[in-house]
């Protein structure tokens, strides 16, 4: 069941704001300081230095993809991951971690295969897929069950 509102953190005053889902695309403002509320509509590249901040600043569900530039399956699912980030903007944040340049972060999450997808909420891992799904739509359906 789809949520009728999402919670966004103000980048200025850090207040959590509940925004009706149908108002997300109309430029919502923070109720406390009137700063424009932003949410990613494309995957965000995360590093060991930025991962915890990116994850903790997002009050909702995260999809983390551990990928590699040399992985053919990663290139195959990249358009789907980009679409998921755009379609679920405001309800889901997508983080991408390049395992070749961020090996300690990949080891922290035990991402030994690429791609590896992990769904997180409140810092807790809800589910994971190691390797590419058989069909691209399977990834979309898998993510939808956590929203």
Image (cartoon, rainbow, N blue to C red):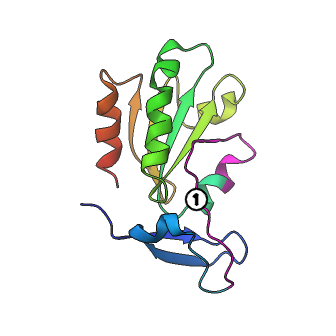
Look at the image and say whether residue 45 sits in the magenta stretch.
yes
Q: Nearer the viewer, residue 17 or 127?
A: 17
Q: Which residue is mark 1?
A: 39
- Residue 11, horizontal then vertical, whole percent: 69, 68
Look at the magenta stretch and give its main secondary structure.
Answer: loop
- Residue 64, horizontal then vertical, whole percent: 52, 41
Q: Is residue 13 above or below residue 47?
A: below
Q: Residue furthest bottom?
A: 32
State the extent of the magenta-drawn residues as a range. 33-53
Badge 1 element: loop
| Residue 113 visible in this rendered orientation of the protein | no
Image quarter (top left, top right, bottom left or bottom right) of the N terminus: bottom left
The residue positioned 46% from the left and 50% from the top of the image is 120
- Residue 142, horizontal then vertical, whole percent: 31, 40
The residue positioned 35% from the left and 55% from the top of the image is 147
Left or right for 68, reference 18:
right
Q: Residue furthest left?
A: 1
User: In which image quadrant can residue 49 be found?
Assistant: top right
The residue positioned 55% from the left and 50% from the top of the image is 41
| Residue 37 visible in this rendered orientation of the protein | yes
The residue positioned 30% from the left and 23% from the top of the image is 135
Q: Nearer the viewer, residue 18 or 97?
A: 18
Q: Number of numbered discs present?
A: 1
User: In which image quadrant can residue 131 be found?
Assistant: top left
Q: Is residue 44 above or below residue 112?
A: below
Q: Is residue 112 above or below residue 95?
A: above
- Residue 57, horizontal then vertical, whole percent: 62, 62
Q: Is residue 30 above or below residue 68?
A: below
Q: Residue furthest front?
A: 26
Question: How many neighbours does mark 1 have within 10 angstroms: few (below 14), some (14-19), or many (20 or more)?
Answer: some
């Amino acid at each position: 069941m789809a949520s009728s509102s999402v919670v966004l953190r103000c980048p200025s005053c850090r207040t959590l704001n509940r925004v009706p889902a149908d108002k997300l695309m109309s430029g919502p403002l923070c109720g406390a300081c009137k700063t424009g509320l932003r949410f990613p509509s494309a995957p965000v590249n995360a590093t060991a230095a930025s991962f915890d901040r990116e994850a903790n600043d997002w009050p909702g569900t995260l999809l983390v993809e551990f990928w590699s530039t040399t992985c053919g399956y990663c290139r195959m699912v990249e358009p789907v991951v980009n679409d998921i980030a755009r379609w679920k903007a405001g309800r889901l944040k997508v983080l991408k971690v390049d395992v070749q340049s961020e090996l300690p972060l990949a080891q922290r999450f035990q991402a030994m295969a690429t791609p590896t997808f992990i769904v997180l909420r409140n810092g807790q891992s809800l589910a994971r897929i190691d390797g590419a799904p058989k069909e691209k739509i399977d990834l979309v359906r898998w993510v939808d069950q956590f929203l």
